[in-house]
Image (cartoon, rainbow, N blue to C red):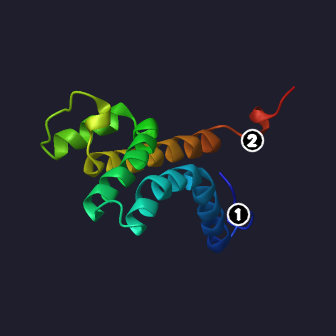
Amino acid sequence: ALGTQTTPSNQVLLGLALFLTILIMQPVGVQIYEQAWAPLEKNQITLAEAFDRGAKPLETFLLRFARDKDIRLFLEISHTPATRTPADLDLKILIPAYILSELKAGFQIGGNYHLHPFGQFQDG
C-alpha cells in the first residue's frame, strides 16, 4: 500500500517497536519486579516461587489480549486438556496464542490499509 521510498527504515521501525513494547509492558514489568524479583533478591522466597509469582502478571496480560480461538488451537496442537478457568492456562499455551493473535491483528490492519485507499479514511 505504501511505496518503499516513503516507509521508514528497518532500524527506525525496530526502534519504534522496542519503545512501544517497553511502554505497553512497563506496568507488567513493575508487577513482576515487585511481586517476584524484589522478594527473591532479599531471599524471602525461592527461585521456583519467584517464577510462579512473576508468571501471574504476564499470564494476566497475555490472557487479556490472546484470542480464545488461538488459545483453543494451541490447546489442541499440544494435546493439552482444556482448563476449568482461563487463569489456569499455562504459559506454553498463552505465549504462542498471544503471538498468533497479534500477528493476525497486524495482518488485518495491513490488509485494511492495502484494500482501502487512504482518501476514504479522511473525515468529512
The quarter of the picture where residue 82 lies is top left
Residue designated by label 2: 118
Give how far across and how far down residue 7 sits, in percent: 70, 63
Where is residue 59? Give x, y as percent.
38, 45
In the displayed structure, does residue 99 sit left or right of residue 47? right
The answer to which image quadrant residue 90 occupies is: top left
Q: Position of residue 81 (x, y in %)?
A: 13, 36
In this rendering, the answer to whether 9 lies above or below 73 is: below
Crowding near the residue tagged with mark 1, few <14, some 14–19, many ≥20 C-alpha atoms within 10 Å? few
Seen from the viewer's position, the closer of residues 10 and 90 is 90
Q: Dot 2: within a 10 Å radius of its alpha carbon, few (fewer than 14), some, or many (20 or more) residues? A: few
User: Could you tell me which residue is drawn at 75 percent across and 33 percent down?
Assistant: 120
In primary-sequence order, the first of circles 1 and 2 is: 1
Tell me which amino acid carries mark 1: Thr
Above or below, 82 against 113 in this view is: above
Q: Which mark is residue 96?
A: none
| 49 and 102: which is toward the camera | 49
Q: Amino acid at mark 2?
A: Phe
Taking the spot 45% from the left edge, 49% from the top edge, the residue there is: 103
**Residue situated furthest right in the rendering:** 124
* Tag of residue 7: 1
